[in-house]
Structures are given as C-alpha cells and as structure tokens.
Amino acid sequence: MEDLRDQSQEWGLEYNHLADPDEKRVLFAAFDSFRQYRKTAHYNVTHRRRQNFYALSTSQWQMLSAPPFNLLANFERVDAAIDANADIASAMLASGLRAFDVKNSDFEGAATPTDMDKAKSTIRQFYRDWSAEGDAERRACYNPVLRDLESAFVNVQDKSSVKVLVPGAGLGRLVFEVCRRGYVVEGNEISFHQLIASNWVLNHTIQGQSLALYPFALDFSNLISREHQLQKVKIPDVHPASALKGIIEDSANGVDRMTMTAADFVILYSEDRYKNTFDAVVTVFFIDTAPNLIRYIETIHNCLKTGGVWINLGPLLWHFADRGPAIRDEHNTVTPKAMSGIEEPGSFELTDEEVLMLVEEMGFDVQSHEIRTDGLGYIQNPNSMLQNAYSNSHWIAKKRP
C-alpha cells in the first residue's frame, strides 16, 4: 500500500493505487459530490422552495414575505449558510485531490444522487465530531470506551507501547482522542466521503474554531424557531495538529502514532501481516454495519493479540437488513465480484444477547456488559421537535489463548 502523507507534516493515510476501476469510480463520485454541493444544495433547498412560494396567490406570498414571517429573507439566510458549508466542502475537495493525486477534470459528473446525500451527511457530521456543541453526543459514545482503555492498560506506563485499532473511524475524532491519550492508534474507514473529510480536518485545518458550519440549515421540518434552523457552530472545536504537537515532538516517529487506512475492514485486517498486531480494538457504532457479523469477529480475532481487549459500544441498527440475494451468473454461481469483504453474499441480524453469545463462541470471553440508556441521537438537533435516541450495548471482551 502506498503511504500518501507528507512525512514531516501529516498524519498517515494509507491507500492502494487506484487500479480497480470500481474503486476509482467510487472515489471520483465522492470528489464530485463535494464539488457539486454548493450548486445542488442551492437548487434543491432554496430554489425549489422559492418556486413553490411564488406559486401561492399574490396576497399569500406577500403576507408571508413581510414581518413577522419574512420567509423570503429566511431563504437568503439559508443560502448564505449553504455557502458557508460549501466552503468546507471545497476545502475538503482541495485537500483530498492532493492526498489521492487526482486532477479536477478527472471526476466531473461522476456523482449520483446517493453520493450527493453522502456529501450532505458528511458535512453535517462535523457537528457531532468536531464542534463544541456536539460534545454531548461524543461524551455518551466515546468517553465510556476511552475509560475502558484506561482501565485495561492502567498498569502500562508507556502508553505508546499499546497499539489500538478503530474500525469505522468516520471523521477521525475517536482516533484523535485515543492518540491524544498517548496510545498508538490506527483508524480504518471504507467511505471515501469520510476519508476525505477526516484527512482534511486532521491535516489541513489551520486553527481551532476557525470555520462556520450550519449543520441544520437544510432542515425545514420540526422547527421551533428559525434561529434553531440557522444555528452556527465553529469547527474544529480543537485544532488537531496543535493538540498533538507534543506527541510529534516527543516521539522519534511522531506521525506514526496516528494513521488511517482506506480499505474494506474485513479484507485488509484478515491478512496475515495483521495477525496478532493490536493490543485493543475499539468499535463504536460499527458492528451493525456488518452484513455478516461472523466475518467481522473473525477479522478482529485475527488482528488482536492473545489477551487483547475488544471494546464495543453502539446500537444494532443492522445496515444490511434489506439486502437482496447474492448476485449469481447463468450457472447459478455467485459471481466473483460479490465474493470479497463487505460485498460477500449473505446477511443476518442478531439480537444483543445473540451477538454476545456469538462473540463468546468465536474465541472471546465477555468481561462486562451493559445497556446504556444515556445515548443521544446521531447528529441530532437538540432543538428539533423530533428527537430520536439510541440505547447502546457496551461491552468488553478479551481474546482467549
């Protein structure tokens, strides 16, 4: 795998050459979705609403455009918020093109509507992972597992001797927090949208609270106040490079203390080179992304050292619950394309009790387990009239000899 970082400045991003046409297409679609964010958000959010607004009778739209409603003025405020979010999308795109050595002209027109939705949700996710206002969600999800790490390695004086893997690393906040506590940490993420975003925030932001984000500007339902819709937060709440400066300076290979891999978790970490590599694996809001949880458990068992700990926290919103049957050729044989990693055929959904039994069955001893009911929503507007919240299964398992 190619190491794409500037050795003296950036935290690592490891990725294969873009030899696979499908991988290349997915990456280019992610780039194009960030490129198109400004245009499509303006069109789908405010332009369409202006058209519907002016379709009202003249007396009606004039009444709603005047005080105290000021709906036309609100559309302008939303447009300004979209532009602020689009500035973040543009910054992520620029840094991503450099990281993956891609030219602007290579990917225009590649994004699908699904890619555009992923771009919007990725930008919104900065609220959860990199704003002060998102701290409540982070505390509920990250603090328990960080305390578990501390307890598991309380007798280890040199935390840099402990190597931690974080699958499903997303925008990199948990990876950052693990590194900040002195551990060597490797994040893994399959989504190019998330990788582009995490690379930008970890390596290319200039200072803390330097950029305005309007996480809920595109939402027009369940609002109590327009001010809630147009809430502004500043990101990142902490500047990663400054916060980790001491770690770089105090270590001969400081940038190697935190790395990210861009790959299918099952394919990469099932390789022999990762066998018995990590002292701990931390999964947060991750295991329910598995169509086949057995493969996830096998992979964690492969890369975790004997006696190593697996710390998990999250719900069981099985992402592939509506998955269709495997793709088969004219001979009723599963096609090779469907035979690797998360694309493997077959899926199933378990209860929390069954998950724990499966973990035990496959070589782990569950040390502790609780259902946490302090969970908040996922990128939840705290002022929305609609509130969704998860209860999270939190457990620690140890790999048996």
Image (cartoon, rainbow, N blue to C red):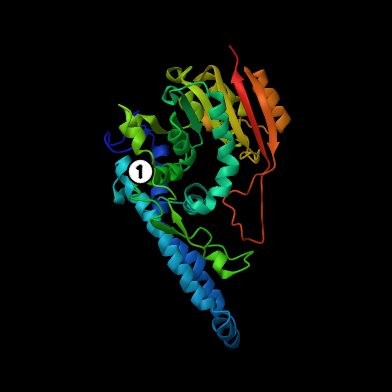
Q: Residue at x 51, y 36 (%)?
A: 168
Above or below, 341 against 35 in this view is above
Q: Position of residue 190 (x, y in %)?
A: 47, 37
Above or below, 118 against 358 in this view is below
Q: Position of residue 392 (x, y in %)?
A: 66, 39
Q: Is 202 on the left or on the right of 297, as rendered?
A: left
Above or below, 257 against 176 in this view is above
Q: Residue furthest top?
A: 401
* Quadrant location, the C terminus: top right
Q: Secondary structure at mark 1?
A: helix
Q: Is 388 on the left or on the right of 336, as rendered?
A: right
**How crowded is the residue under tag 1: few (<14 C-alpha within 10 Å), some, or many (20+)?**
few
- Residue 52: tell me if it is visible: yes
Q: Position of residue 373 (x, y in %)?
A: 70, 42
Q: Position of residue 97 (x, y in %)?
A: 32, 46
* Quadrant location, the N terminus: top left
* Amino acid at circle 1: Ser
Q: Residue at x 37, y 50 (%)?
A: 92
Residue denoted by label 1:
242
Q: Quadrant of residue 357?
A: top right
